[in-house]
Amino acid sequence: MAQEIKGLDKVHTLAPGEGRAQSSLRRLTVAGQPFFVLKQRGRFADIAYDHGRLLAREMEAGAFPEIVATIARGVNLESKTFSKIAAALYRAYSDRVLEHCSNEFRDAVKALGEGYRAGAGAPQFSDLEVRDAIIAIEVGNVVDGTLHAFTIPGLRARKAPGVLALVASRLSDAETRNYLEAAKDDPARQQEVGAALQALAGTNTRMDFACTGFAVPADLAADGLHLHARNLDADLYNWNNAPVLSLIDETEENPAWHRYAAFGTAGLIYPGGISGLNDVGLAVALHQMSTTEVESGFLFDHGDIAPFVQQRMLREAASVDDAVDIAKSTRHFAAWTFFVSDAKTGAARRIEVNGERVRVTVHAGEAVAQTNHFLHPDMAERHFGAEDNHFTPTFGKWLETHARFESISAALKADAGHQRIDVDWAIDWLSSSRDGMLERIRTALPAPPDALAAERAYGRVPRKVYGQLGSIVRADPKRRPWRDEVWMTTGDRLPSPHSSYIGWQVDWQGFELNPIADRGLRRVAHYEKEGRRHWEESLGRYLWARLALSRPRDAQGDLLRRRTTAAEHQEALAGAIHLLTSAIELAAMDRLVEVPYHYMRARLHHAVGDYVAAEADWRLLRAIWAWQQDAPAIPADWPVSVPRVMPLMHPYEGALVALLSAVTDDMRFRTLEWEGRAERLDAALELFAKVKQDCFGAKPAHFDLRKWIVLAETVKAEGGATVELPEPNFVTAE
């Protein structure tokens, strides 16, 4: 194993007088990929300073430029007035969140900036940009919840005056400030402001997480070791320019605290806020939600951003109940789940928080899954309005997080207690193609087809198009030395769950990380063994297609800090279509037809006005749905003459395909009088109604599903040219 890692014998430290903590950095190369191991002892602020000084160069090539560009692009709207409002809104919330954090966290943020400036020499980022980048994940959550509140009339009426007053206080432009002052008492203007600012929470301008995880007690896992694993799905595609595995010791400040290993990237001063393991066997992972119950500040107290709260759990908690106490003693800005488990007892807790409350689900002696929806009865999304403690932004996201949860839960139920759940099992499921909703359909068929029919490249599966990190920890319940392991993806290929995992043995007493000798570098292997090598390569092309639109660059290759021009957007669409075509061709080499690839290409062809090309993809998807329903065959151009397996589709996808193909044909024929139009739109509405009934019964349906139904009714009555389609979503494939 050691021979596959270059640089193990080279330790970089700061010269006497340059550092503030005891810090050492190994700049490694693992199978050609940069990888960093950072060991630090000292106070949190001093550790942050050294982090910035040692990794200044990597910060400028890593996630920070991506975060800074995304913030700048998000506030650059079409209207100058609304651009000023958006910039003031983001500035107001970023300032308030940091102002209302603990002194310890604020000191660390300041120290990182100081260390970065000292290490960079000629820094690319200002202190303000560094600060904004560190807290962007929480600020984005607060902004997202605030803007969603503007879409709910009653909630907008309650919250808008205070929000607009806060934003107005940050504006120097008198005209814009006067506009907002007038909007405080004008519901129509409040709605106008809310609609304009939705771009701040768009799929291409948010810093958000998805994330799939699971925890398995030692007696239900293999080798007698507790296992806790997670994917980090985040819009940070430069994360793996500088992946950092940290080993941290702050016990000099408080001997009752704990050493911990954690997973991050250059500039991330709270790697324990992603996932990690401490020296008493407590494992943690953070999962993001969305909520309108946000707080940007506190009248009589302070809070902390969720990643730092979780890092404190690693540092200070010896049990899951200790972690719960930390969460309950802290004020929270937005919605998160702290997913914690304890190797010593096999206990796990889901600690669900938003700006108003904390709730805990208790698990003992069982394997537990976690995705991105609350599960406590007090917190679960059920009204799809102001009454809920969290919300999913689209119905596709609602389906997607439940499908991932269903897939992982079923796998845990099947394999827990049978000595199967080890590192390889975790790697396979973190990179899984299983769609829980399609699996439900497949197994209900009279003659269920091959399990491959319920698999997908992307969409409602654990592997996400923005998967940046996979982490796995294994811990000895008896706390014997040299038994704990931490595994982290190197990012040598994307999506990261398909990259190589590198394993390290943790020596807590000696404060060292040692490469695991036995297969210390491994990755998912079954796709290639099963004849899906080209299909696996296609995953990267789909990902690049998304990046063409979500991470626009200028002619020099630098990330744009402004909105794309119409010409630039058309060029990006053309590039994305080309990449999707490449993905389709690669999958076809393994005789596979991927519904998300054709669906997204149809959406993009429609967006550029190539309705003939869009119709060809819609026709193929309609043919797949017709086959699934035993309806008359629809002739279509297939990318492969005989697919290895006919892919399944969810009724929601059937409804979307019927609706959106009708919109395309309205544009293609330039008339509403084409054959089969009424029948196709009736079929779409019937399928939407079925999905609504199947998912929600007589209870309120998801607000986004209701929007799709209204859109379908409008298309039927007035035509496809009269509607504006939602932005295509590569993550959920709608």
Image (cartoon, grey):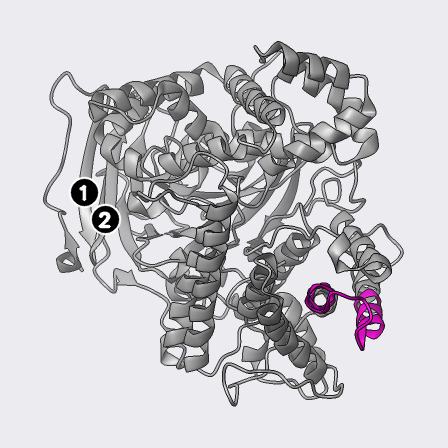
For image coordinates 74% across by 82% down, the residue present is 629
Q: Amino acid at mark 2?
A: Pro
Residue 156 place in picture, x, y as percent: 78, 28
In this orientation, which residue lies closer to the viewer: 685 or 390?
Answer: 685
Mark 1 Cα shell of 10 Å, populated few (<14), some (14-19), many (≥20): many
Residue 59 appears in the figure: yes
For image coordinates 50% across by 62% down, the residue present is 220
Residue 60 place in picture, x, y as percent: 29, 34
Whether label 2 touches label 1, CB < 8 Å = yes
Give the secondary structure at mark 1: strand
For image coordinates 15% across by 30% down, the residue present is 13
- Residue 374 position (above or below residue 141): below
Which residue matches tag 2? 34
Which residue matches tag 1? 27
- Residue 253 position (above or below residue 135): above
Magenta part, dominant SS: helix
Q: Which residues are magenta?
A: 660-685
Sequence-first disc among 2 and 1? 1
Give the secondary structure at mark 2: strand
Look at the image and say whether residue 310 sits in the magenta stretch.
Answer: no
- Is 447 situated left or right of 589 in this image? right
In this orientation, which residue lies closer to the viewer: 717 or 515?
Answer: 717
